[in-house]
């Protein structure tokens, strides 16, 4: 059957199980859009190509499948860069399809020509230029294979306009992926494995560091069994949240820069770290010279390049988390580590008392209250998509996730503007799930144009803006480390509720704690998107905190005194 | 052996852009490449690279493992600690007049180098061997006046039965088993 390259693309995407594409048309991708119109694929028109990549990313993270973004050549493609890098740093399987100028004029600085494969080389798992219609189907199948295998990541396929227009024989069977032969490494080193087993069975103060890799490999069940067998306390990375239920007593919560003090102290006192599907990011370890000095370390990780990168480990078990955990299970001697578990509980000390949730209501509105109330009202069952900054850390602290893929957040790259578009993608992946956006007033203003996409697509998500009138996390650093010189962090914002109305979305503004729960309830009852502008304490900070580069043992604790009271007048 | 100089061998797809991916990766890891040679193997679809990098063992591990993550890299291996045969080739244009020419010829003989071009005022000397040997010859030639020089960079091969061959194509994409049944 003869089809054009553009038709082959649409047919291939359909056969690969794609239903939605997030994109923005333009000259060099027009043949594909013409074919899209005749296909069963649903195209979501975004308002900026960065939004398309974040939507595809949110789709991928919520579903575990592959998200697809599309853009034209030149500026369309370069606008995708931030979204691609976001997906790369968080190992998210996104396939980006870009139009390119005709192969005959490649390299001539033609209108809207840009070397997007050159630009995205370090931020994609792989990228490729397609110049022939007959290569479209195979290349796309390869892209999908690469994106979601091993350690997932974004793949960009750049298709020249003539390849879209030319006709070629379409034969799905004959266009099976044909990737270069790879050496199969034998990652199973028996001596290393035995050493790990010995460490696991002799540790007195073990702790597991649970990361995103558990989710990616679908190891949740194997992991829970592993934890139960050894009765190990579990500390979570930001992206690991959800892979182990928050309501399990062994789940200590998040570790690292804004992890609770007892979690970090437990890591510092441990005699064995069992790292599973995590990469010892600097936000997790703090100063490496003082990190977990008395602990031996086991690293279970699929990516060999992560072994001994930041932290030198005593045993590296390279492989898929689920496979490795299942191989370890029969060798684990059941142990309750009772003394250690009790000690970790003692480390909590007065943390609960200091916690903002325990403070008497002083009439002011704190972000932590808002997020905690959203958690309670949604019974912890919503998919929460956050942006980056203070609200992100408060979400990690005060929304307790029991199921995987229910917290979607930009961890590695820390991309402001991620939340709103990523939530749109998540909603398409899980149309029956309740999706909440938790976003700051800064990040929201970066991609708020996607409100129009929400309206055009008639989707139902709830948007909670944690509005403190500052670029809050940067302000917090200025408060702690720059003598409160608030340079470029006070932030003027539009009236978000009125803005929502202008888009045709219901908007609310909340300034009092008593209004929070009723507003959340009424928003949840609505079958349409609702935006709530929570005007919270301006100069509240995220506690505890490990300063950048400081030791995990040196935490800035929550002050005992009442919190700052600088609430804005409504 | 210099601990801060590591030798890696990589088999890669012999197609445009692969060299860029490899060198760009080293740049991203902030690893300085001392020399990188690339040429086709007996199978023209596969090229072999010898990469000599200014880094320690840990950096070499990271480079090796990161290289193997590239789709177009079939295999990458740090061979620094193995028994190696290493060769570098240089063409050295040195000024030579009637008087010093005999002296020059003596030196060339000692180093088992060859004269490959003769002109009234200069000679081109071809020399191959380990890096030290070429550096040694260069040192003694310097007083005569080195006019121009081109070096290939190192190629390395493990000795004897220690084989480093590209993976056969029947093991195709074994590392890339799909999690999605649609592909």
Image: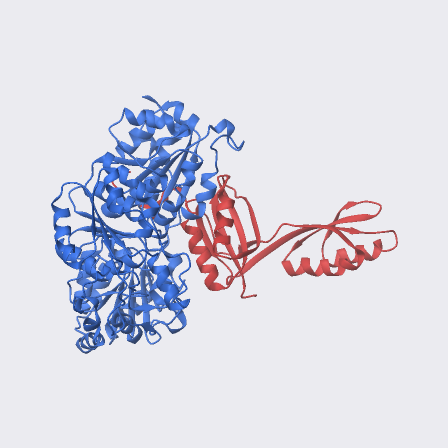
For the N terminus of chain A, give its image quadrant: top left
Is residue A215 shown left or right of residue A413?
left
Q: Observer-nearest residue: A515 or A142? A: A515
Q: Colour of chain A?
A: blue
Examine the image and state in which quarter residue A554 appears: bottom left
At 45% across and 39% down in the image, what residue appears? A116
Residue A237 visible in the picture = yes
Is residue B164 shown left or right of residue A17?
right
Q: Position of residue B155 (x, y in %)?
A: 57, 52
Up-down relation of residue A36 to residue A120 (above or below): above
Q: The chain coloured red carries which letter?
A: B
Residue A327 visible in the picture = no
Up-down relation of residue A69 to residue A328 (above or below): above
For the C terminus of chain A, give its image quadrant: bottom left
Up-down relation of residue A267 to residue B153 (above or below): below
Q: Position of residue A444 (x, y in %)?
A: 31, 48
Q: Position of residue A491 (x, y in %)?
A: 35, 53
């Amino acid at each position: 059957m003869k089809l054009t390259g553009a038709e082959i693309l649409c047919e291939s995407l359909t056969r690969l199980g794609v239903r939605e594409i997030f994109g923005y048309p333009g000259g060099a991708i027009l043949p594909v859009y013409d074919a899209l119109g005749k296909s069963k694929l649903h195209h979501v028109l975004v308002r900026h190509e960065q939004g398309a990549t974040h939507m595809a990313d949110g789709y991928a993270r919520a579903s575990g499948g592959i998200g697809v973004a599309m853009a034209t050549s030149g500026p369309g493609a370069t606008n995708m860069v931030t979204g691609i890098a976001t997906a790369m740093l968080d190992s998210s399987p996104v396939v980006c399809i870009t139009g390119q100028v005709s192969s005959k004029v490649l390299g001539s600085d033609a209108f809207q020509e840009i070397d997007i494969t050159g630009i995205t080389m370090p931020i994609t798992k792989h990228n490729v230029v397609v110049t022939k219609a007959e290569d479209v189907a195979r290349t796309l199948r390869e892209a999908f294979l690469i994106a979601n295998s091993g350690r997932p990541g974004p793949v960009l396929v750049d298709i020249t306009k003539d390849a879209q227009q030319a006709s070629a024989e379409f034969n799905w069977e004959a266009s099976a992926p044909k990737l270069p032969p790879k050496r199969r490494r034998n990652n199973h080193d028996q001596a290393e494995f035995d050493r790990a087993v010995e460490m696991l069975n002799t540790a007195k103060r073990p702790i597991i560091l649970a990361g995103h890799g558990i989710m990616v490999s679908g190891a949740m069940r194997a992991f829970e069994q592993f934890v139960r067998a050894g009765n190990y306390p579990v500390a979570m990375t930001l992206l690991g949240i959800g892979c182990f239920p928050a309501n399990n007593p062994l789940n200590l919560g998040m570790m690292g820069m804004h992890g609770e003090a007892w979690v970090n102290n437990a890591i510092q006192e441990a005699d064995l770290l069992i790292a599973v599907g995590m990469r010892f990011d600097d936000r997790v370890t703090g100063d490496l010279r003082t990190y977990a000095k008395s602990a031996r370390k086991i690293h279970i990780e699929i990516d060999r390049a992560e072994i001994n990168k930041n932290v030198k480990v005593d045993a590296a078990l390279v492989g898929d988390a689920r496979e490795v955990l299942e191989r370890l299970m029969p060798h684990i001697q059941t142990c309750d580590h009772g003394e250690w578990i009790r000690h970790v509980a003692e480390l909590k000390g007065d943390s609960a008392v200091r916690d903002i949730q325990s403070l008497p209501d002083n009439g002011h509105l704190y972000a932590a209250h808002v997020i905690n109330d959203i958690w309670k009202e949604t019974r912890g069952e919503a998919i929460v998509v956050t942006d980056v900054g203070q609200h992100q850390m408060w979400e990690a602290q005060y929304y307790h996730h029991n199921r995987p893929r229910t917290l979607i957040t930009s961890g590695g790259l820390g991309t402001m503007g991620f939340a709103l578009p990523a939530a749109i993608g998540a909603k398409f992946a899980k149309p029956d799930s309740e999706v909440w956006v938790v976003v700051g007033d800064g990040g929201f203003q970066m991609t708020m144009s996607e409100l129009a996409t929400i309206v055009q697509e008639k989707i139902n998500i709830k948007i909670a803006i944690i509005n403190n009138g500052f670029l809050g996390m940067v302000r917090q650093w200025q408060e702690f480390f720059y003598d409160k010189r608030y340079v470029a962090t006070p932030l003027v914002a539009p009236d978000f509720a009125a803005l929502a109305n202008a888009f045709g979305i219901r908007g609310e503004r909340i300034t009092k704690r008593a209004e929070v729960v009723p507003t959340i309830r009424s928003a949840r009852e609505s079958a349409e998107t609702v935006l709530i502008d929570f005007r919270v304490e301006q100069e509240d900070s995220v506690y505890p905190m490990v300063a950048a580069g400081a030791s995990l043992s040196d935490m800035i604790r929550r002050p005992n005194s009442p919190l700052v009271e600088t609430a804005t007048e409504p | 052996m210099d601990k801060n100089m590591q030798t890696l061998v990589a088999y890669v797809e012999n197609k445009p852009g692969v060299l860029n991916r490899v060198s760009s990766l080293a740049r991203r890891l902030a690893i300085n490449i001392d020399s990188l040679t690339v040429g086709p193997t007996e199978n023209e679809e596969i090229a072999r690279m010898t990469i000599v990098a200014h880094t320690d063992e840990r950096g070499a591990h990271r480079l090796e493992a990161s290289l193997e993550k590239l789709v177009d890299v079939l295999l990458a291996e740090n061979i620094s600690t193995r028994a190696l045969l290493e060769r570098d080739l240089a063409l050295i244009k040195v000024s030579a007049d009637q008087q010093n020419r005999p002296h020059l010829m003596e030196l060339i003989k000692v180093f088992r180098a060859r004269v490959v071009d003769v002109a009234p005022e200069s000679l081109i000397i071809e020399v191959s061997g380990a890096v030290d040997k070429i550096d040694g010859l260069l040192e003694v030639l310097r007083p005569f006046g080195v006019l121009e020089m081109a070096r290939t960079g190192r190629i390395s091969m493990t000795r004897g039965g220690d084989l480093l061959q590209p993976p056969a194509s029947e093991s195709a994409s074994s590392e890339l088993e799909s999690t999605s049944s649609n592909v």
